[in-house]
Amino acid sequence: MLKWALIFLVAGLVLGAMGFGGIGGAFVGIAKLLFFVAIALFLLFVILGVTAARRI
């Protein structure tokens, strides 16, 4: 998921530099969303892993 966030970020920056600000901004917004979803999933799995390890 972080890979896709990075791809959308780079595409958004390139599009913004080429003058397509609206589309570039949308791509950067998607990259931000994917980044925060990836961080949330990472934290969720860390918490689940720690709690499952304590039960064993």
Image: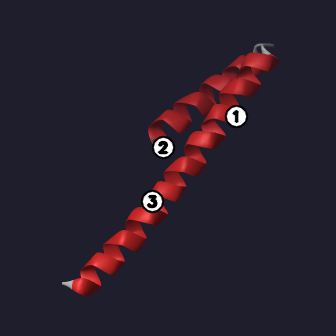
Pinpoint residue 24: horizontal percent, then vertical percent.
72, 22
Q: From mark 1 to mark 2, how far is it between C-alphas?
A: 14 Å
Q: From mark 1 to mark 3, how far is it between C-alphas?
A: 20 Å
Badge 2 density bin: few <14, some 14–19, many ≥20, Cα 10 Å: some
Q: Which residue is mark 2?
A: 2
Q: Residue at x 48, y 43 (%)?
A: 2
User: What secondary structure is found at the residue carrying circle 1?
Assistant: helix
Relative side of 15 to 45, left or right: right
Badge 1 density bin: few <14, some 14–19, many ≥20, Cα 10 Å: some
Q: Residue at x 24, y 85 (%)?
A: 55
Relative side of 12 to 48, left or right: right
Query: In this view of the protein, can residue 17 be seen by the observer?
Result: no
Marks 1/3 in contact by CB < 8 Å: the verdict is: no
Pinpoint residue 16: horizontal percent, then vertical percent.
76, 21
Sequence-wise, the earlier of marks 2 and 3 is 2
Q: Quadrant of the N terminus?
A: top left
Q: Which residue is mark 1?
A: 29
Instruction: Nearest to the eye among marks 1 and 2: give it.
Output: 1
Residue type at numbered disc 1: Gly
User: What secondary structure is found at the residue carrying circle 2?
Assistant: helix
Relative side of 12 to 2, left or right: right
Q: Residue at x 58, y 29 (%)?
A: 8
Image position of 24 with respect to 37: above or below: above
Q: Residue at x 68, y 21 (%)?
A: 14
Looking at the image, which residue sits at the far front? 55
Sequence-wise, the earlier of marks 1 and 2 is 2
Residue type at numbered disc 3: Phe
Query: In this view of the protein, can residue 3 be seen by the observer?
Result: yes
Instruction: Nearest to the eye among marks 2 and 3: give it.
Output: 3
Q: Which residue is mark 3?
A: 42
